Image: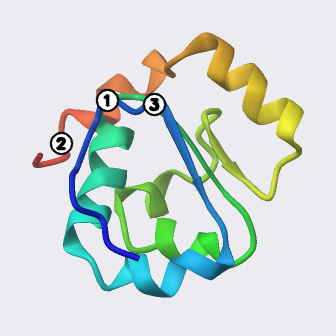
Amino acid sequence: MRCKTADTQTEASKNTKSSVDALLKQAKFIKFVNEAFKRCKVIAADGEGERLLKATFVKDHMKDKAVHLNDKPESFKKSMAKHRNWDRRPVTDSIPI
């Protein structure tokens, strides 16, 4: 799997076990997750996807209300309906992207 672009136009992303090993090797994808976090977007992962989040700035903010780790789809959908977690903004100012 290759991440050819870092498109922050994406409103949310979710990755599962099969893609994590490949994505951890790609700096562009790590940057993609960091940019999504900085832009207050919803982020979700389950199972092995936690390793991916731990390689990003998300690792220090796993309790953020728009970061979903092993959550039910309904919880993810509710966050998506809000589009972004603007409460995260004070934290994101320090992310160098």
Q: Earlier in the sequence, mark 3 or mark 2?
A: 3
Q: Earlier in the sequence, mark 1 or mark 2?
A: 1
Q: Is residue 58 left or right of residue 6?
A: right
The circle on residue 39 is 1
Q: Secondary structure at mark 2?
A: loop
Q: Nearer the viewer, residue 30 or 22?
A: 22
Q: Residue at x 45, y 31 (%)?
A: 41
CB within 8 Å, label 3 to label 1: yes
Residue identifier under label 2? 94
Q: Secondary structure at mark 3?
A: loop
> Looking at the picture, how far across and down is residue 32, in whole percent?
29, 52
Residue identifier under label 3? 41
Tally of numbered discs: 3
* Disc 2 residue crowd, few under 14, some 14–19, many 20+, Cα 10 Å: few
Q: Could you give the CA–CA distance between mark 1 and mark 2, rounded to whole angstroms?
A: 12 Å
Q: Nearer the viewer, residue 80 or 37?
A: 80
Q: Amino acid at mark 1?
A: Arg
Q: Residue at x 11, y 46 (%)?
A: 97
Q: Quadrant of the N terminus?
A: bottom left
Q: Is residue 13 above or below residue 85?
A: below
Q: Is residue 13 left or right of residue 6?
A: right
Q: Could you give the CA–CA distance between mark 3 and mark 2, rounded to whole angstroms?
A: 16 Å
Q: Could you give the CA–CA distance between mark 3 and mark 1, rounded to whole angstroms?
A: 6 Å
> Looking at the picture, how far across and down is residue 51, in whole percent?
55, 78
Q: Residue at x 32, y 72 (%)?
A: 2
